[in-house]
Every structure is written in structure tokens, then in C-alpha cells.
Amino acid sequence: MKADYMIFIVGTNPLPNLIAADKFLDDHSQVFLIYTEGSDNIVGTNRIKDHIAKTLKKRRPNLTIQSFATDKSNPIEIKHTIDKIMLEIKKQGQSFKEKTIALNYTGGTKTMAALSYHQNKKYMKEIFKNDEFYFLFSYVDGEIGKILYEFKQQYHADEINKMVDKYDRVLEDIVEIHGYELIHAEELETAQEYAQFQNVTVRNVEQPEMVIHFDEVYVHGYQLTCLRKDLQPASKNMLKFKIFQAKDHSEKIGGEQVRLFYICNYQDKNGNLMRTEPIENELSESQRINLKDRIRIMNSADVNQQEIEKLVKGL
């Protein structure tokens, strides 16, 4: 099914909105983006909203896109924003017979998600009570790799990785919705269910001097795995610094769920290779989360393609 009207809540992670857009938007859908303005104490999502709109328009030039600002923690303001969007749809005066209004509530705060969901449920019974329309609710769960949605009182769970057909476009779009542009990437032939690119270089759109390079980037569904090689002998402290830098770079272009494969030469003072597992454990402890499913660190002598594929596929 495709949505005639679709509402997106824009959070700091734009990737779920791209996934939901690919799943449900038609070439002539009307899109409504709910975002938050920034302040001294609050990180706004205005720029992220602009990146999403630009990417969606590039894919589907005939989309109609409108944006609505709201307060992420003010329930009354959030409800008022939903009211405005619903009235905007209603005042068009079209027949809503067999039309679909969709809401993707993955982004934004929990307050925004909960209120937008319940406020839209309310409108199903009130404003549109005499119209024969359909309502669709979707949520992208990156942890399990599925997009969950409710349609015609039935619940569905589709695997995200099976939605992709053109990986070169996906790589470019994922980079763009995070505010970067793809400068260079060489796609390699592979018989696997993922795409592999080498010599990948991206540049920040608003700060062109900010350039990020990875030796390889793998695309599995909408999941990026960035690979960086640094074969200069490194001590523990220097290695940890470089890994944190690579982690930061990968998240800038691939989002919160991006994976990182770091190839190094971790040595002791005598030039002997050291085990990298303790470094992975220390990084997880310092971040207070389990990074082992997202970051692999290996000495160059131990690397093989099977180990890389395990991380790419989330095995």
C-alpha cells in the first residue's frame, strides 16, 4: 500500500524516515514534516528536516512537502501541531474515499511519538468520521531490522533489508540525509546480498572543509558498515583515540546504528602484536553500552573477509 498523505516526526536520527518514505510514499504523495526549533539548551531538527526534504524531493520531484515546527516537550503544542496538519488535509475538500493517511512516529521524543499517535487516532473518530479513508501507523525498529506498521486493524512486520534494490542510490541518500554529499565511491562486484564500495569520500554540505574518508563502506539494506585501515604502529591510548574518531566519523554519515570495522597494528613497546579484544571491552565500558555488535577491531594480520561479513550482516 502507498500513502496519499504521510506525516513524519523528525528526530536527530533521520534514517528511519527515509526507510518509511521508501516503503509508503508514492510519486504524488503529500508529506508533512514535524520538527523542532533549536535554542541555547535544545538541539533542534530544522537542518535535519531540510536534509530529509531535499533527499525525498530528489527521489520523487512531484512530492508536496510542508514543514511544521513544534515544541518537543510541550504536549499542548504537539497536539496543536497535529491539529494543524489534520485540518490542512481536511480543508482540501477532496473525497477521502480509499485514501490513506500515514504517520511514521519513529523520530522525535517519546512525548512527540506518543501524542502524535494518539492524536491521530482521535481524528480517525472525529474529523474524518464520515469519510471512507484508511489510516496507517509505522515504526522503524533498527534493533530488530524491521519496519512495523498497523493498517486496516492488522499488524505487519517487514524486514528492512529486503526493501532495497539499488545500493548505490541508498549509499548516496543515507549520506545526504545526514548533511553530507558523496564525493567519491567505487562499487565493487560482489555476489553477496550487500554492496561493497571502496575509497569512499564524503563532504559536509554546510562546512565543505569537513571531509571524511573510509577505505571501504558496505551497505546491507539501509545499514552501513564503515571500514578504516590505519596500519601505523599504535599504542593503546593512541589507538583508542583513533577508533573514537572513526566511530564519530561513521555516525556522522551513517547514523546511530552504523557499524565500524577498524583494522590496525596494535603493538607493545617491543613491536609485538597485541590482542585487540581488551580494547573493544574498554570502549564498551567507557560508553556504558555494548559496542561489540557495532564495532570490531582487528590487527591487519588477523583480518579476513568472513569476519568483515559477520559484522556487515549483524551475525
Image: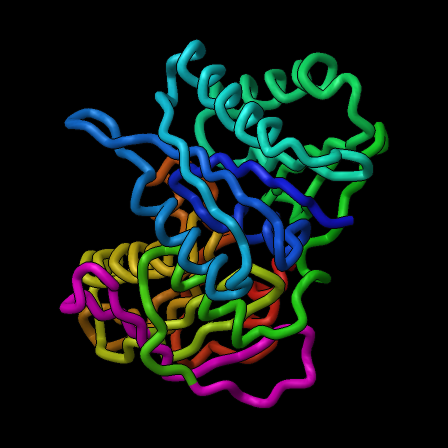
Q: Is residue 259 visible?
A: no
Residue displayed at 44% across by 57% down = 295
Residue 233 location, x and y as percent?
A: 22, 76
Q: Decide which of 78, 196 is in the foreground and name it.
A: 78
For this orientation, the residue located farthest to the top is: 76
| Quarter occupied by residue 157 | top right
Left or right of 99 on screen, residue 188: left
Count of marks placed on residues = 0
Image vertical order of residue 158 relative to residue 114, above or below: below
**Magenta segment, which residues?**
186-213
Question: Split into 4 quadrants, where in the image is the C terminus?
Answer: bottom right
Residue displayed at 43% across by 48% down = 256
Residue displayed at 33% across by 69% down = 181
Left or right of 230 on screen, residue 159: right
Image vertical order of residue 292 relative to residue 9, above or below: below
| Quarter occupied by residue 190 | bottom right
Residue 11 location, x and y as percent?
A: 42, 37
Q: Decide which of 41, 280 is in the foreground and name it.
A: 41
> Is residue 210 shown in magenta?
yes
Residue 53 location, x and y as percent?
A: 43, 52
Residue displayed at 18% across by 70% down = 269
Q: Decide which of 203, 306 is in the foreground and name it.
A: 203
Left or right of 170 on screen, residue 227: left
Residue 275 location, x and y as percent?
A: 39, 64
> Is residue 172 shown in magenta?
no
